[in-house]
Image (cartoon, grey):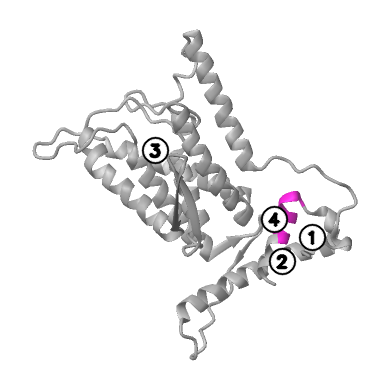
Amino acid sequence: MGIGDRTYMRSQNSEREPWSATAWTLGVLVFVFVLGLIQESAGQHFLDWAPLDESNLRPWQPFSHLLIHDGFWHLLGNGLVLWWTGRLVEYDYGKKVYFLTLIGGSLAGALLWWLTGLGGTQQSGLMGISAGVYALMIVALMDKPDHSITLLLFFFLPVNLRVRWLIILTAIFSLVSYIFSELPSRHHWSGWHMAWDSNIAHSAHLGGLIFGWLAFRRLQQTNLSVSGAPYTTAPYTPASPTSSHPTTDAATNLRKNQAKAELDILLDKISASGFGSLTPDEKRRLEELSARLR
């Protein structure tokens, strides 16, 4: 039985849990996609201002291009990864970190995409939230390298692999595709030609991956509790001389200390205002932390 299941920890009033930030994000993306379908069927152009256009750059485009997707499969791919990794980031670090990672990764991807086209052929425009999704994936999975996951290739072929290899293969694919496809397609250099044709902005994906890695490193130095109060991680504790894996033991102790510090903040809030003062996200987080520290 978890700590949230005990009678004295239950709220008096049954609250309906609100949508998560991840669910709201997906809802907005689907809504805009439906607007795009209406636009096409009506022969209108009321969303043409949204994509990031190199030839006519406007101040809102670095943000508005996140809402537009190039077809159903583009939206579906981003939506599935967003639902998977966005919820992990939201539950582990809170809504603030979720939005900062999503938007920061998207802006970093847009910047790298724009820089890679300087002096070359301008593309039609950048659209989609892929770079932010890549950043969320790094933040969500970097501390779970040995976890095993199952991916459905082409939505029907199951492939099992460790998280570590998923991250490595994603980074390699984005880098190689950028070097041999996107970069030569945007520049006309003698001796360096496009190996294969693609309209995917791999540079934006790389920008998202880099931002996600930097964000993850920052979060390991200064964690953010679900209540939004920052606290520094516990000091490094040297491993026992008898340990056969000192680096792994130290990292495990550090994560446990972070979890205990976060749990203490939630318990202090319960002590001061009662269990009912916790938000639904904080209650879920309390359950997760209590299970992790058993």
Q: Which range of residues does the magenta coloring cover? A: 279-287
Q: Quadrant of residue 27 in the image?
A: top right
Counting residues from the start of the chain, the first of labels 2 and 3 encountered is: 3
Q: CA distance from mark 4 to mark 3?
A: 31 Å
Q: Which mark is residue 227?
A: 4
Q: Which mark is residue 167?
A: none
Q: CA distance from mark 1 to mark 3?
A: 42 Å
Q: Are marks 2 and 3 in contact (CB under 8 Å)?
A: no
Query: How many neighbours does mark 2 have within 10 angstroms: few (below 14), some (14-19), or many (20 or more)?
Result: some
Image quarter in which the N terminus is found: bottom right
Residue linked to disc 1 = 4
Query: How many neighbours does mark 3 have within 10 angstroms: few (below 14), some (14-19), or many (20 or more)?
Result: many
Camera-side mark, 4 or 2: 2
Whether residue 66 appears in this view of the structure is no
Q: Which residue: 57% across, 69% down?
A: 255
Q: Are marks 4 and 2 in contact (CB under 8 Å)?
A: no
Q: Which residue: 58% across, 26% down?
A: 31
Q: CA distance from mark 2 to mark 3?
A: 40 Å
Q: Nearer the viewer, residue 96 or 152?
A: 152
Q: Residue furthest left?
A: 190
Amino acid carrying mark 4 in the image: Ser
Q: Are marks 1 and 4 in contact (CB under 8 Å)?
A: no
Residue linked to disc 3 = 110
Q: Give the side of residue 37 with respect to residue 154, left or right.
A: right
Camera-side mark, 1 or 4: 1
Q: Nearer the viewer, residue 75 or 103?
A: 75
Q: Position of residue 41 (x, y in %)?
A: 50, 11
Whether residue 154 appears in this view of the structure is yes
Camera-side mark, 2 or 3: 2
